[in-house]
Image (cartoon, grey):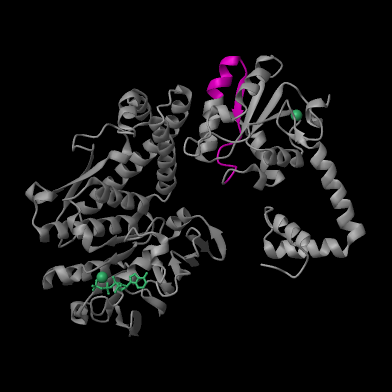
């Protein structure tokens, strides 16, 4: 399919169309808008993307995505080091941050256990998590995983692994994260779920 | 009208129905017409207003009209207790079946909260003779009619079990992973068993002092080989799963749990297992159970369910047929019934509306008669 634009522009549209929330139509509109607003959008966007491409990386401590080896949360002296929130995905971490209800640190698993999808403990960032907990500063781990079967299996599995290390393991109020993803919850719901957390 | 009824039904590209529109006033509906006209297809379309795969257990894509092949849609106005809901379900392209209730996207399981639908179809004539799977589904449909959350528990159980089965096949020895999955299976499984037992006792109670022309059946839940089922509590299940790992690993699947339960029925007055009863008696037992379920629901939910009775009239003698109609009308249930000839429904008189279905060039035509 061709729009009659040049090959490079077609290529850009095709790539944009792969982004979540965009399809071929909206990608075409977006690209056209960018080109029309070259100085306002296209040039700064290209520059921002180049910079992000050069610097974006996973935080070696928590798995958050930032621009240096340690993310801002892990280096901030204001964050409570005794409390750790365990999430499935970076988008969940960002959702918690947007809600501004949590002042501890995070650990991003990068998935949840699913034998059917071939995701086992080795595919998740578990060794790193256990190392962090074993260092002794963490007193409580909050499992902020989805209310899906996989999310709850993972929560149960983690609780069994972390409790023997001598920390309190709690979970977000059951049933709150409908459909699993924290990312879809509004801030009020996240903060209510956090306040109502309980031990497994 | 404090009942449960479809007041309007629209089918688009559903099997032989290119487009069908019927308005009803809540009375039972008698559907007649020749073989292959498209009568059962209408019942199947209505069954899609409840969670699951409907009364043929067909894949959603197969219900699309073959000539178009782009999908299908069922739109219904559902009067449930004091409220009216617009329910739309269907498939587009090769996407999964979608559901909207009053314009909002909803999960399939949400259908169970507003629509309680039970059915009897000819393949169920062999219910007591064939595999346990069909009987278990019959039992689960009963349970679902009383307790809509039965659907969620079943989905959770299935999902966790499929994961466990994968671990077994992969010969995994990660005890913690098994523990986590079995914990969910035990919780959901205990809920499933409790809901099933509750359904059986409600149906038993509804049979006790009923004025009915149909024979009483005594139901019980057994294990896969007819043995007494274990209590099915969370603790019992958790222990059974943990103890069964080695054996299950050899089999490559989970051999114990509520997914292996069976339903046994006895013709109470004759003390005869249903599978040894005559064909007619077996049919009468099924009708009796559906009616008892409906009476129990009228009590607990506040309205009897919508009944889909495919070719039920044809197999009953005149007296039994009249008795069935009388009981349906006394209950106030909206029964959608099919039969080849209009005369099968004569005993209903003005108590039902009639739909005449015919077929022309592979397309069904439906004519409402007052
Ligand atoms: N996906 C489909 N697209 C088009 N037609 C279909 C599709 N699936 C089934 N049919 C047709 O629908 C027709 C009617 O089927 P249905 O089972 O509703 O008939 P019926 O009126 O109940 O007949 P009977 O009295 O024999 O039970 C059949 O002839 C069948 O070929
Ligand atoms: Mg039929
Ligand atoms: Zn970090």
Quick check: is A190 in the magenta stretch?
no
Relative to B294, is A56 above or below? above
Q: Quadrant of residue A68?
A: top right
Q: Position of residue A105 (x, y in %)?
A: 73, 28
Q: Quadrant of residue B239?
A: top left
Q: Is residue B11 visible?
A: no
In the image: residue A128, left or right of residue A11: left
Q: Which residue corresponds to the image point at 73% horizontal and 40% vertical from the top-left?
A: A94
In the image: residue A128, left or right of residue B166: right
**Which one is in front, B89 or B264?**
B89
Q: Is residue A38 visible?
A: yes
Q: Quadrant of the C terminus of chain B?
A: bottom left
Relative to A77, is A50 above or below? below
In the image: residue B122, left or right of residue B179: left
In the rendered structure, which segment of residues is drawn in magenta?
Answer: A159-178
Q: Position of residue B87 (x, y in %)?
A: 48, 66
Q: Which residue corresponds to the image point at 22% horizontal and 71% vertical from the top-left?
A: B325
Q: Position of residue B250 (x, y in %)?
A: 31, 28
Q: Which residue corresponds to the image point at 30% horizontal and 26% vertical from the top-left?
A: B247
Q: Position of residue A78 (x, y in %)?
A: 83, 26
Relative to B269, is A30 above or below? below
Relative to B177, is B329 above or below? below
């Amino acid at each position: 399919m061709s729009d009659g634009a040049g090959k490079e522009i077609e290529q850009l549209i095709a790539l944009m169309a792969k982004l979540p929330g965009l399809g071929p139509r909206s990608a075409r509109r977006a690209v056209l808008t960018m080109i029309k607003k070259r100085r306002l959008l296209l040039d700064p966007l290209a520059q921002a993307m180049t910079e992000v491409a050069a610097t974006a990386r996973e935080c070696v401590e928590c798995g958050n995505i930032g621009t240096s080896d340690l993310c801002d949360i892990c280096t901030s002296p204001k964050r409570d080091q005794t409390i750790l929130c365990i999430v499935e995905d970076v988008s969940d971490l960002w959702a918690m941050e947007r809600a501004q209800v949590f002042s501890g640190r995070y650990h991003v698993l990068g998935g949840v256990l699913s034998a059917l999808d071939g995701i086992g403990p080795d595919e998740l960032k578990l060794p790193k998590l256990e190392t962090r907990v074993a260092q002794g500063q963490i007193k409580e781990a909050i499992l902020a995983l989805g209310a899906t079967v996989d999310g709850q299996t993972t929560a149960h599995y983690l609780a069994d692994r972390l409790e023997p290390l001598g920390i309190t393991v709690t979970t977000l109020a059951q049933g709150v994260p409908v459909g699993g993803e924290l990312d879809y919850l509004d801030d009020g719901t996240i903060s209510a779920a956090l306040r109502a957390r309980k031990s497994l | 009208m404090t009942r449960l009824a479809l007041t309007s039904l629209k089918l688009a590209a559903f099997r032989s129905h290119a487009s069908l529109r019927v308005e009803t006033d809540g009375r039972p509906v008698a559907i007649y017409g020749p073989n292959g006209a498209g009568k059962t297809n209408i019942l199947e379309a209505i069954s899609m207003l409840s969670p699951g795969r409907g009364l043929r257990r067909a894949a959603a894509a197969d219900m699309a009209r073959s000539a178009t092949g782009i999908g299908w849609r069922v739109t219904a106005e559902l009067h449930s207790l004091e409220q009216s809901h617009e329910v739309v379900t269907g498939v587009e392209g090769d996407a999964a079946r979608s559901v909207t209730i009053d314009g909002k996207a909803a999960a399939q399981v949400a259908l169970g909260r507003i629509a309680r639908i039970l059915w009897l179809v000819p393949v169920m004539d062999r219910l007591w003779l064939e595999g346990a799977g069909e009987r278990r589904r019959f039992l689960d449909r009963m349970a679902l009619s009383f307790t809509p959350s039965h659907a969620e528990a079943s989905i959770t159980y299935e999902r966790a079990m499929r994961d466990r089965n994968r671990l077994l096949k992969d010969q995994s020895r990660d005890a913690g992973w098994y523990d986590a999955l079995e914990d969910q299976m035990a919780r959901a499984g205990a809920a499933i068993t409790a809901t099933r037992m509750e359904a059986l006792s409600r149906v038993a109670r509804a049979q006790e002092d009923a004025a009915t022309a149909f024979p009483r059946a005594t139901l019980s839940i057994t294990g896969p080989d007819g043995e007494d089922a274990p209590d099915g509590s969370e603790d019992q299940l958790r222990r059974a799963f943990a103890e069964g790992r080695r054996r299950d690993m050899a089999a490559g699947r989970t051999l114990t749990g509520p997914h292996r339960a069976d339903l046994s029925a006895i013709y109470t007055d004759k003390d005869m297992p249903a599978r040894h009863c005559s064909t007619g008696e077996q049919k009468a037992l099924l009708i009796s159970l559906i009616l008892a379920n409906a009476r129990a629901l009228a009590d607990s939910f506040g309205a009897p369910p919508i009944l889909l009775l495919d070719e039920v009239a044809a197999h009953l003698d005149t007296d039994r047929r009249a008795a069935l109609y009388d009981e349906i009308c006394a209950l106030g249930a909206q029964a959608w019934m099919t039969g080849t000839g209009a005369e099968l429904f004569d005993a209903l008189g003005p108590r039902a509306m009639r739909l005449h279905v015919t077929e022309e060039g592979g397309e069904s035509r439906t004519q409402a008669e007052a």
